[in-house]
Image: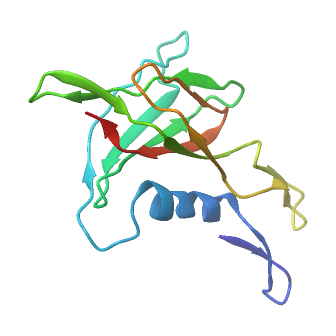
Amino acid sequence: MFMVDKDYQIQQRTSQFYAAQLLTQEWAQPKDADHKLYTATSDVKDSAGHTLVTAYPLLRPDGQWSVMLVNKDHDHAHEVRVVFHDAERRKDLAFAKPVTMITFGKAQYQWHADRKKGHADPDNPPVTSRLPGGETAVYTVPAASLTILRGILDH
């Protein structure tokens, strides 16, 4: 999780550190309570039919929905529209306004291998922004990124 010097003093956080923080502090709620994980589908695919952006929706104990989006496309950002389907009410729902977006990708962190002198540059934490929600909202998922969208649903 960390790059250390010869005396084991932390010199840099690694991408695994930031990803673990996103999973445990932003996507999930850091609380000993039930979280409900749901299935999702994605229509963001390459020409061979491989899914480029995967989604992992989670209902947190605080009532917020949190969707982790993984963009496996190293070179391109993708626009996504997030739709929650309520099968019982036969209704599609979207995030209400505002939506918190937390992104960690190659714009924040890039590893440069150099044997024992390997390092990250840039070496920045995830970026947080607030975006409008609504049924027509489109979210840009940066290339090679892990992105969390979090908010309440517009009923």
Image colouring: rainbow
Give the quarter of the image for residue 84.
Answer: top left
User: Looking at the picture, how far across and down is residue 3, in whole percent?
Assistant: 77, 72
Left or right placement of residue 115 versus residue 49 in this view: right
User: Looking at the picture, how far across and down is residue 100, in whole percent?
Assistant: 52, 46
Q: Residue at the spot x=62%, y=65% of the render?
A: 17
Q: Residue at the spot x=45%, y=33% of the render?
A: 54
Left or right placement of residue 43 versus residue 101 in this view: left
Give the quarter of the image for residue 107.
Answer: top right
Give the quarter of the image for residue 136.
Answer: top left
User: Looking at the picture, how far across and down is residue 37, in whole percent?
Assistant: 27, 48
Q: Residue at the spot x=28%, y=61% of the render?
A: 61
Left or right placement of residue 88 versus residue 73 in this view: left
Observer-nearest of 79 and 75: 79
Rendered-image quadrant of the N terminus = bottom right
- Furthest residue in direction top, as rendered: 47
Observer-nearest of 14 and 31: 31
- Furthest residue in direction left, as rendered: 88
Observer-nearest of 49 and 21: 21
User: Looking at the picture, how far across and down is residue 28, in whole percent?
Assistant: 40, 59
- Furthest residue in direction bottom, as rendered: 7
Observer-nearest of 87 and 23: 87
Q: Residue at the spot x=77%, y=57% of the render?
A: 124
Left or right placement of residue 8 versus residue 25 in this view: right
